[in-house]
Amino acid sequence: MWKLNQFLSGDDEEREESFLEEESDGFCSLSPTQSLIVFAKPIKFALLFTFGNVLAVGSTAFLIGPGRQLGMMFDPARIYATAIYIGCVVLALICALLIHSKILTVFAIIFEICAHIWYSLSYIPFARRMVSNLMIRLCDTEL
């Protein structure tokens, strides 16, 4: 409310300076504990992260319709990416809820992130092939 009053009163110079100062300080408003929650509390992070991923996939189903979403997910071009992604989501939930192992949960989160990237790349034409060729070139040991 103070910024609105300052804007309406016409203090342009002070407003510009305070705007720049706020932007430089506000790049990361997370505390160190909050930014490292994946390592401090990986089970809680895994649950929230997995729930967020499920909501992200569900939001596209809301936009285009559940039938079309399932049809696109189980299209022959991306059936394997979908199966791996769903498997990694289930694996993360099992590690977090049933096994209660922090280290396994962190690995499951990493696998879920990789599977989500691969699944997302399946919607971009030739993206998986391009990333595969790039990884082969980067990890090739022959010079």
Image (cartoon, helix red, strand yellow):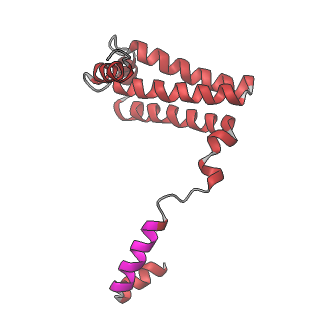
User: At which x and y percent is residue 3?
Assistant: 44, 79
What's the residue at 62%, 34% (across, down)? Answer: 46
What range of the chain is rendered magenta?
13-24
User: At which x and y percent is residue 139?
Assistant: 39, 21
Q: Is residue 23 above or below residue 35?
A: below
Q: Is residue 32 left or right of residue 23?
A: right
Quadrant hosting residue 68: top left
Query: Outermost residue toward the left?
Result: 125
Quadrant location of the C terminus in the rendered image: top left
Q: Is residue 9 above or below residue 19?
A: below
Q: Is residue 1 above or below residue 98?
A: below
What's the residue at 36%, 88% (across, down)? Answer: 11
Q: Is residue 30 left or right of residue 63?
A: right
User: At which x and y percent is residue 80?
Assistant: 42, 12
Quadrant hosting residue 41: top right
Query: Outermost residue toward the top?
Result: 76
Q: Is residue 117 left or right of residue 42?
A: left
Total count of labels: 0
Quadrant hosting residue 66: top left
Q: Nearer the viewer, residue 22 or 61?
A: 22
Query: Outermost residue toward the front?
Result: 143
> Magenta part mainly helix, strand or loop?
helix
User: At which x and y percent is residue 64?
Assistant: 34, 31
Q: Nearer the viewer, residue 47 or 109?
A: 109
Residue 139 belongs to the span the image colors magenta: no
What's the residue at 28%, 27% (across, down)? Answer: 124
Q: Is residue 96 left or right of residue 134?
A: right
